[in-house]
């Protein structure tokens, strides 16, 4: 894999407030570039953004541009939104209070994305939702024929409607709910979509998790996360044009709950992620790959 001759897919898991975890990783990438005198935004490094649930929100925010073409939100902006407004967005008590009208997540998404349409987003994207009518995954993609009149806010609301927190969204013949009902880890769907978008090209997938605990008792959601990871790991062994890097920090202090927005837990999410970054060789490899993509290195992996 040399220079810029490959496509980068950024895949971000669902996980509510634990979206703090991938945001800290992405922020560290940006800060490392600053340390060597380069100002980059994540879209400079990514060809396809893929997200499930909170991962879709993060992806869309990083892709969103002002009318001038300037990036609307930097990684640090999105991270601060999670840290400062997470209580209003992800806390179940608030979602229940607003369940009949403008729920807090809907308010935040509409105020930040306004009338921006999915067709306005760049580059390629894939946001995972789930159709309760057909009982199957539903993908919002740039190549979908039925997104012309769908706003970014509408798509994200439909991709984050967690059962028990927010009601499903009716959109034409579909009844859409949170993408985690399909898979918390959208990597498998992102791989298949990338192969359609970039036939014959080399693909590097960077898959960012939202944290796990070793002693955690796995449910079907976490089982699907593991199966998706195993699927992609196996494919990377046989597909010479596919490189796969999974970054999934262990949560030693933070809660695994998707709605624990206490100050203590937010700090623990940040600290656990920083511990992971500083203790794993994977991050160093990731940064070197990003430098290659940015045109700063020519060494093959």
Image (cartoon, rainbow, N blue to C red):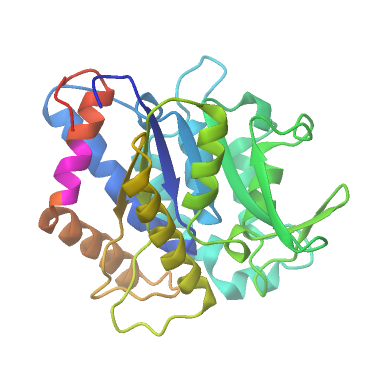
* Residue 259 shows up from this direction: no
Q: Quadrant of residue 104?
A: bottom right
**On screen, residue 287 above or below 219:** above
Q: Is residue 286 left or right of residue 81?
A: left
* Residue 65 shows up from this direction: yes
Residue 111 or residue 258, whichever sits in front: 258
Q: Residue at x 45, y 56 (%)?
A: 13
**On screen, residue 65 above or below 179:** above
Q: Residue at x 56, y 56 (%)?
A: 53
Which quadrant of the rendered structure holds the N terminus? top left
**On screen, residue 209 above or below 62:** below
Q: Is residue 295 left or right of residue 97?
A: left
Q: Is residue 268 left or right of residue 206?
A: left
Total numbered circles: 0
Magenta range is: 282-287
Residue 57 or residue 148, whichever sits in front: 148
Tell me which secondary structure the magenta stretch mostly adopts: helix
Which quadrant of the rendered structure holds the C terminus? top left
Does the magenta run of residues contain 298? no
Please provide percent x and percent y for residue 97.
69, 72
Q: Residue at x 43, y 81 (%)?
A: 218
Please provide percent x and percent y for residue 85.
47, 56
Please provide percent x and percent y for residue 271.
21, 63
Residue 264 or residue 168, whichever sits in front: 168
Q: Residue at x 37, y 49 (%)?
A: 207
């Amino acid at each position: 894999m040399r220079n810029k001759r490959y496509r980068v897919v950024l895949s971000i898991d669902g996980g509510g407030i634990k979206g703090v975890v991938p945001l800290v990783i992405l922020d560290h990438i940006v800060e490392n570039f600053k340390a060597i005198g380069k100002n980059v935004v994540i879209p400079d490094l990514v060809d396809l953004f893929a997200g499930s649930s909170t991962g879709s929100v993060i992806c869309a925010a990083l892709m969103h541009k002002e009318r001038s073409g300037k990036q609307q939100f930097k990684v640090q902006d999105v991270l601060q939104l999670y840290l400062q407004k997470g209580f209003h967005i992800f806390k179940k008590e608030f979602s229940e209070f607003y369940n009949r009208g403008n729920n807090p997540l809907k308010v935040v998404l509409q105020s930040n994305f306004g009338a921006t349409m999915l067709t306005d987003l760049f580059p390629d994207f894939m946001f995972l939702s789930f159709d309760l009518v057909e009982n199957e995954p539903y993908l919002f993609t740039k190549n979908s024929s039925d997104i012309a009149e769908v706003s970014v806010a509408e798509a994200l609301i439909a991709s984050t409607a967690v059962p028990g927190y927010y009601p499903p969204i009716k959109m034409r013949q579909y009844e859409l709910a949170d993408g985690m009902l399909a898979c918390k880890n959208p990597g498998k769907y992102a791989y298949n979509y990338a192969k359609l978008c970039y036939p014959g090209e080399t693909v590097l997938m960077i898959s960012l998790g939202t944290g796990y605990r070793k002693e955690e008792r796995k449910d079907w959601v976490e089982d699907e996360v593991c199966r998706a990871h195993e699927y992609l790991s196996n494919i990377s062994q046989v597909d010479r044009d596919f490189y796969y890097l999974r970054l999934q920090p262990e949560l030693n202090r933070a809660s695994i709950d998707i709605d624990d927005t206490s100050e203590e837990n937010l700090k623990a999410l940040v600290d656990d992620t920083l511990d992971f970054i500083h203790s794993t060789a994977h991050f160093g490899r990731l940064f070197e790959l990003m430098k290659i993509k940015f045109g700063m290195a020519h060494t093959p992996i």
